[in-house]
Amino acid sequence: MTSSVELKIHGDVAEIRVVNPPVNALSRTVRGRLVEVLAGVDQLGVRIAILTGGRERFVAGADIAELDKPIDPPDLLDIEAVIAQLATPVIAAVEGRALGGGFLLALMCDLRVVHRNSSFGFPEVSLGLLPTFAGTRIPPRMCEPAFAARLIAYGEKIDALTALRAGLIDEISPEDDVAAFAGRLQVSGKRRTLSLPPPPTAARAQVEAVITSVAAEKRGFLAPETALRSMLFGLDAPLEAALENEARLFEALRVSAQSKLLRTLFFVERSASRSPAPQAGATRGFISAPGLMVEQRLLGFSPAPTGVLTYDQARAHADSRSLRLVTMPAVHLGETMSACMSAAIARMNVEADALVGALREAGFSAVAAKYWSRSTAGRAPAQLQAKPIIAALRRALRECPDLRDAAPAAVNLLSTWVLGWPRWDASIFGPD
C-alpha cells in the first residue's frame, strides 16, 4: 500500500511528498504521517527539506468527510509546531491548487516556491466554516490586512502572481519542476509566520470595513463575518487567546445548520458533476433564467447562455469553450421550480421595488433579486419584511405537485442553480 507521505533523499535535500489521491486532502492519516516524517528531518543530515504534493498538485485542503465531528489530532498546529522546532528550513514547493488547509500548510513553512500556474485560496466559507488552526491569524500578518480579509471572507482563488505581489508566497519557479528548483535554493534560515508581529493599528479599520461590506452583500450568512471577527480579535490578541477564540468560533460554525447544509450541497454537487451524461438530444440539459445562471456558473462553472438548452446545445457550448458539462439526473426539475417561483411571486401582488428589498434582505444577490421582482426602477427599494416573503416562497415550492417526489437534496441544489437562492439558506424542505 502506498504511504500517504513519502520521503526521498536527494543528496543534501529531503523531499517530503504528500500522496493522497485524488486531491491530496489533509486527512487524519496524512497529518499523522506528516508529523512523523517532519519530526525526523534534523536527523537526516540534509540542508533543506522540500514539502510538496508532486506534479500538478499540492494539497487541496481538509478531508470534508471528517468534518461531521471535531477534528482529531494531530492538526495543522501540531504540524506547524514540528516545522518551527526544526533547525532545517522547510520549503513548500507548490504546483496546482493549495487551498484551505493546504494553503495554510504552505504558509506554515519557512519559504514558499510555486509554479506559475498554481492557485491559492481559503474556500472554507463556501462550507460555512472559517480557516482554523491560525488561518485567520497568519494571513493578515503576511499581507495587507484588507487583502487577507477579502481573501477569507469571499473564498475566492488567487493566482501565483497575485499571491506573490500580496506577500503570501516568496518566489515563482522559472521551471516546471518546482521541487527540483526549490532544492537548489540557498536558504539562510528559518521564518515562523505564526510568530510574525501584529500589523499596524490601521489594520483594525481595514478589517472592519470589509466586515461592513460583507454583512451588506451576504445577509444572513454566518461564516464570512464570523471569520473576520476572528481575524479582528487576533490582530493584537496574545497567540494562545487568539487560537482559542478561533477554535471556538470554528466549532460553533461546524455544528451550525448553515454549515451542515453547505457541506451536504458540496457532496450533492460533486455527485452531480460526476453523473453520466444523457444521450445526445434525448434530454433537456439546463434552464437558465436570464442573469441567474450567469451568476451561479452552472454550465462548466462559467457563464451559460439564457433560455432552455437541449443537451446538444449545452454540449456544443461547453466544447466551444473547453468547459466541463455539469449534468445531474434531476436537472429537468429546474423548469418546474422556475415556473413555481414565478407563480408564487405573482400571487404576492407586491410592488417590485419592495420585493427587491425583501429578497436582498434575505440574502439574494442584487442580480437575482432584480430578476425575480422584474424591477427596472433605479430608486432605493421600499421595505418589506423578508421572513414572511421567503417562508411563502418555500411553501410554494414544497407544495408544488411536480416536486413532491423529488429528492430534497436535488431540489436544494437546484434552488441555488436555477433560482439564485442564497446557498447558505438553500434548504427548501427545511424550516421556514
Image (cartoon, grey):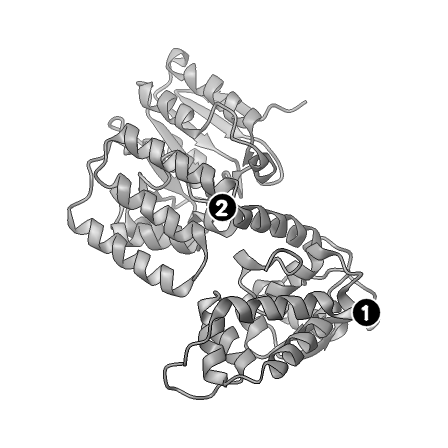
Q: Which mark is residue 66?
A: none
When the figure is inspected, residue 307 is found, relative to residue 24, above or below; the finding is below
Residue 89: give x, y in percent of width and height: 32, 25
Residue 365 visible = no
Q: Amino acid at mark 2?
A: Arg
Q: Secondary structure at mark 1?
A: loop
Instruction: Work out how far the residue at label 1 is from the one at label 2, CA to CA, in angstroms.
Output: 33 Å
Could you tell me which residue is drawn at 43 percent across and 88 percent down? 377
Q: Amino acid at mark 1?
A: Ala
Q: Position of residue 131 (x, y in %)?
A: 42, 42
Lower sequence index among marks 1 and 2: 2
Residue position marked by numbered label 2 in the rendering: 97
Residue topped by disc 1: 280
Q: Give left or right: position of 359 versus 312.
A: left
Q: Tell me where residue 178 sits by quadrant.
A: top left
| Front residue (pair 432, 105) | 432
Residue that appears at 57% across and 51% down? 262
Packing grade of label 2 (10 A; few <14, some 14-19, many >=20) is many
